[in-house]
Amino acid sequence: MNSLKFLAETIVKMYVTLLPAIIAGVLVMVWCKTKIMKPAMKPMDMGKNFCDGKRIFGDNKTWKGFIGYLLFGTVSTVIWGVVCHAANIEHLNFFYAYHENTFLFNLMTGFLLGLGYALFELPNSFLKRRLDITPGKTISGGWRFFFIFLDQADSIFGCALVVWLFYDLGIGLYLLYVLVGAFTHIVMNVLLYLCKLRKNPF
């Protein structure tokens, strides 16, 4: 019973800590569909090919999306810091275990969350281009479920790593973060698909 209680409390802390990243991910989906900063919708690989003749990341990884993650990750974290203080739930946020909930600290961690989110999506895109998987799609066959998981977990690897910089998660909690984050990502993608903000749920 104590183990289940500890697990439940830990998962709650995980959600409280990374809620700004979840919000930022949703806002970026909306952001990329607006006409704001339209020139920034250019691919991050600038249409260039790797040495194998295939695109580096593909058209779906744009500078506008990258900027969006930095912007909304930072803003969401700053606002969430105010909410955590007002609601007296700072003790549930891993970031505040050893650091004060200040504007500058939230500014820094929010920027790093956005950066981690954006950068850790790139290796997955790079790998999928090598395997000729269409951008925004997944592979069929035996590797399908692996790539579905990777698609949902890639950004969480980055965000959880940022948390680890400020709180000693250890490898066990880090991997649990990734699993919980991947599950959450799947649920969010289905909801975004139903809201017509995604072309497909996976």
Image: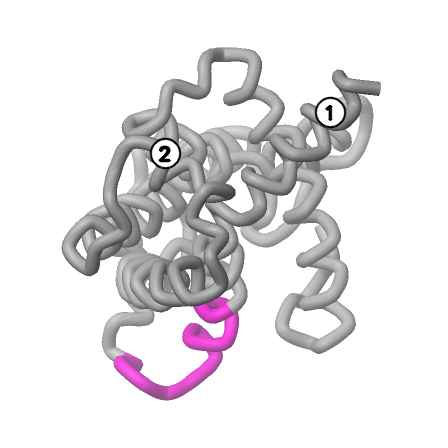
Q: Is residue 35 magenta?
A: yes
Q: Are marks 1 and 2 in contact (CB under 8 Å)?
A: no
Q: Position of residue 24 (x, y in %)?
A: 44, 62
Q: Secondary structure at mark 2?
A: loop
Q: Is residue 54 left or right of residue 200?
A: left
Range drawn in magenta: 27-38
* Relative side of 4 to 81, left or right: right
How many residues crowd mark 1 within 10 Å: few (<14), some (14–19), many (20+)?
few
Coordinates of residue 60 in the picture (x, y in percent): 45, 57
**Residue pushed farthest front?**
88
- At x 52% / y 55%, what residue is drawn? 22
Res 4 quadrant in image: top right
Q: Residue at x 77, y 72 (%)?
A: 194
Classify residue 120 as left or right of residue 129: left
| Mark 1 / mark 2, whichever is N-terminal | 2
Label 1 vs label 2, nearer the camera: 2
Q: Which disc, if any, is residue 97?
A: 2
Q: Which residue is mark 1?
A: 143
**Is residue 38 or residue 78 the one in the foreground?**
78
Vertical side of 160 occupied by 138: above or below: below
